[in-house]
């Protein structure tokens, strides 16, 4: 098991690991949050067993110095051969670090939507065995191209590129499998998300599909954690 903690990058304080945290804790894998926007300095990738990048209301194309720092961290982690998991904005940052384009999606995708796995996705080491389609939480306005050398794993009706894998241990998920009902309820109250919430035609139910999300998250994130052992 890793001795040093996993590096976890947050883009806002309210978007944390969610359902990922208990999986890591149960596996005895320590982790530490770093908020680059607040000036935190994460360790060099050679000193951390893996990198997880969470979501946030920013765009990967925003010209914030801390996002440039994050891109360099991802590039160094790739060179060090460490596992990476990017979620939503985190996935977009990984795609961008790999040279892919990040751009506005045709529409904002916010709410519960069916996710369709490709043939490769249906047999992916992390995703195999999930229902196909599988309803997940989406909350994004941007999308990414699949990076060169990576494989396409999933799509939705409103967003073609929902997940990719590079090699065996670099993953980008546009969707939010990590959220708990408590997290989603909190997101809907956050000032940074008020604009998105006002655009919804009906309120988001934080408890929708909770059992399905819990079961799938335990499987997917437990399999990801196994990459570190």
Image: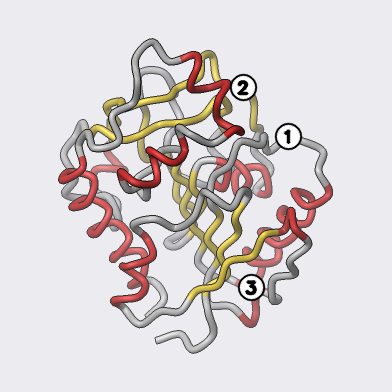
Q: Position of residue 72 (x, y in %)?
A: 75, 58
Q: Position of residue 76 (x, y in %)?
A: 70, 66
Which residue is rendered at x = 69% and y = 43% of the image? 99
The label number, if any, that marks residue 80 in the structure image: 3
The label number, if any, that marks residue 136 in the structure image: none
**C-alpha distance separating marks 3 and 1:** 25 Å
CB within 8 Å, label 3 to label 1: no
The residue positioned farthest toward the top in the image shown:
201
Q: Quadrant of residue 203?
A: top left
For numbered disc 2, what is the local secondary structure?
strand
Q: Quadrant of residue 114?
A: top left
In depth, the one of 109 and 22 nearer the eye is 22
The label number, if any, that marks residue 104 in the structure image: 2
Relative horizontal placement of residue 208, taking residue 203 as reference (left or right): left
Front position among marks 3 and 2: 2
**Mark 1 surroundings: few (<14), some (14-19) or many (≥20) residues within 10 A:** some
Q: Position of residue 151 (x, y in %)?
A: 44, 44
CB within 8 Å, label 2 to label 1: no
Front position among marks 3 and 1: 1
Relative horizontal placement of residue 92, taking residue 184 as reference (left or right): right
For numbered disc 3, what is the local secondary structure?
helix
**Is the residue 227 above or below the residue 134 in the image?**
below
Which residue is rendered at x = 48% and y = 34% of the image? 189
Which residue is rendered at x = 39% and y = 86% of the image? 1
């Amino acid at each position: 098991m890793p001795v040093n903690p996993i590096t976890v990058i947050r883009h806002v304080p309210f978007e944390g690991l969610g359902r990922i945290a208990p999986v890591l804790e149960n596996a005895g894998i320590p982790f530490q949050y770093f908020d680059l926007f607040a000036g935190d300095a994460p360790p060099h990738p050679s000193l951390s067993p893996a990198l997880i990048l969470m979501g946030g209301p920013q765009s990967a194309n925003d010209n914030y110095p801390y996002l440039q720092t994050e891109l360099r961290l991802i590039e160094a982690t790739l060179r060090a051969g460490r596992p990476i998991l990017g979620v939503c904005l985190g996935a977009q940052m990984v795609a961008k670090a790999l040279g892919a384009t990040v751009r506005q999606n045709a529409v904002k995708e916010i709410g519960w939507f069916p996710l369709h796995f490709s043939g490769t996705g249906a047999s992916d080491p992390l995703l195999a065995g999930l229902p196909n389609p599988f309803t997940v939480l989406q909350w994004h306005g941007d999308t990414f191209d699949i990076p060169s050398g990576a494989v396409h794993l999933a799509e939705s009706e409103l967003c073609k590129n929902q997940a990719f894998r590079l090699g065996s241990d670099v993953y980008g998920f546009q969707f939010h499998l990590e959220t708990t009902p408590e997290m989603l309820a909190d997101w809907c109250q956050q000032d940074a998300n008020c604009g998105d919430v006002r655009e919804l035609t009906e309120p988001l139910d934080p408890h929708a599909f909770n059992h399905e999300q819990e079961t799938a998250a335990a499987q997917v994130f437990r399999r990801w954690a196994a990459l570190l052992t």
